[in-house]
Image: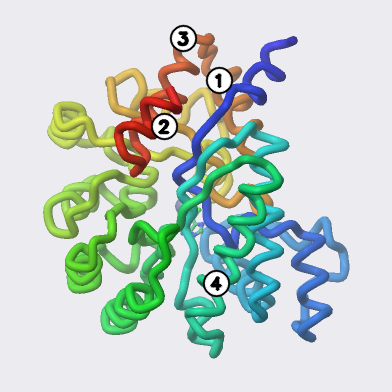
Amino acid sequence: MDYPEYLRSVPKVELHCHFEGTVRAATFADLARKHDVALPTDEVERLYDYDTIYEFLKIFGMVSSTLIDREDFARCAYESLDDGVRLGSLRYREMFFNPTLHTRRGVPMATVIGGLVDGIRAAETDFGVRCRLIADVYRQDPPEVARQMVEEVLANRVDELIGLGMDGAEAPDPPEKFAEAYRAAKAGGLRLTSHASEDAPPVNITTCLDVLGCERIDHGYHIMSDDAVVRRCRDEGIHFTCCPTSTAVVYGWPDLTAHPIRDMVAAGLNVMLNSDDPTMFHTDLGSEYIELCTALGYGPETVRTLVLNGVDATWLDDSDKTAMR
Ligand code: ES4
Ligand code: ZN
């Protein structure tokens, strides 16, 4: 077995993967036809082309608008986990979804969550992969919409729904805007994470930890510009869910040998690897390991550390974590 094959076959967990960003281009085209949604191009292979986070988020919203029936959510969740297993040897995922991108179009929360869970349970039966869900605040929503979303998620809670996260464009909307939504989620027993310092200074990491109560940080790359925040996160063992390809494309680190992930690992931070929006960024979990580890010359020992960091960073209980190591 050559090294790329080995990297693809290592069993993995994934904690930073957006459901809507895992929809296959062909399935997006199929659902658009089903629901009469107009697409920007007839060429399936060009549906997921963009250069900026704003263009990306526009298509992300368009993909979301083709998900209407419970079966649409179930089909896409099932295919998403099928792809994770086949292309990345995925064993366990905590997967984001954006409730308000669906409920604002009139899709009931129960349809969204019910469909996702149908797909997740079918994938567990067929592929042996486990998946749980993290509802994400969409930063461009008003704070009141986010707080309302949390209430609705809690009212439709199932065993698989375990956390609250936050995504969308980071630069215009800082994390403290959503303190209320995070307070409500914590009171409801949800675990907490957030995208932070993906496209903004490291103060957003500090805010997420101290104001929102986040237990891990999604992305976090700008941390390297503040030694004090690096020291604090290292000392507290904060986990960072990093995504090589997506940030290379939309945040300007096209050369993986110079990606901040390299410095975060070297600084002793707890980093683990993820695919973010795999179909939309033309990647997959196995390829993220292959691209980054070959670019940075990471051998099997470092790969083992990255994979085990992932297990530690999950919100599984200790006996499940032990079983997975
Ligand atoms: C995202 Cl790459 C990225 N950044 C911010 N928000 C997102 N939602 C889905 N993918
Ligand atoms: Zn993300």
Q: Quadrant of the N terminus?
A: top right
| Residue beneath disc 3 | 301
Kindly state the secondary structure of the residue where label 1 is placed: helix
* Residue displayed at 36% across by 61% down: 166
Name above or below for residue 191 compared with residue 237: below
Report x, y in % for residue 316: 36, 41
Marks 4/2: CA–CA distance? 27 Å
Kindly state the secondary structure of the residue where label 2 is placed: helix
Q: Residues within 10 Å of mark 2 (few under 14, many from 20)?
A: many
Q: Earlier in the sequence, mark 3 or mark 4?
A: 4
Report x, y in % for residue 237: 21, 30
* Residue displayed at 49% across by 18% down: 303
Residue 28 is at least partly visible in this image = yes
Kindly state the secondary structure of the residue where label 3 is placed: helix
Which is more toward the observer, 87 or 230? Answer: 87
Marks 3/1: CA–CA distance? 11 Å
Marks 2/1: CA–CA distance? 15 Å
Name above or below for residue 131 compared with residue 90: below
Please name the amino acid that badge 4 sits on: Gly
Query: Picture quarter containing residue 48?
Result: bottom right
Q: Earlier in the sequence, mark 4 or mark 2?
A: 4
Marks 3/4: CA–CA distance? 40 Å
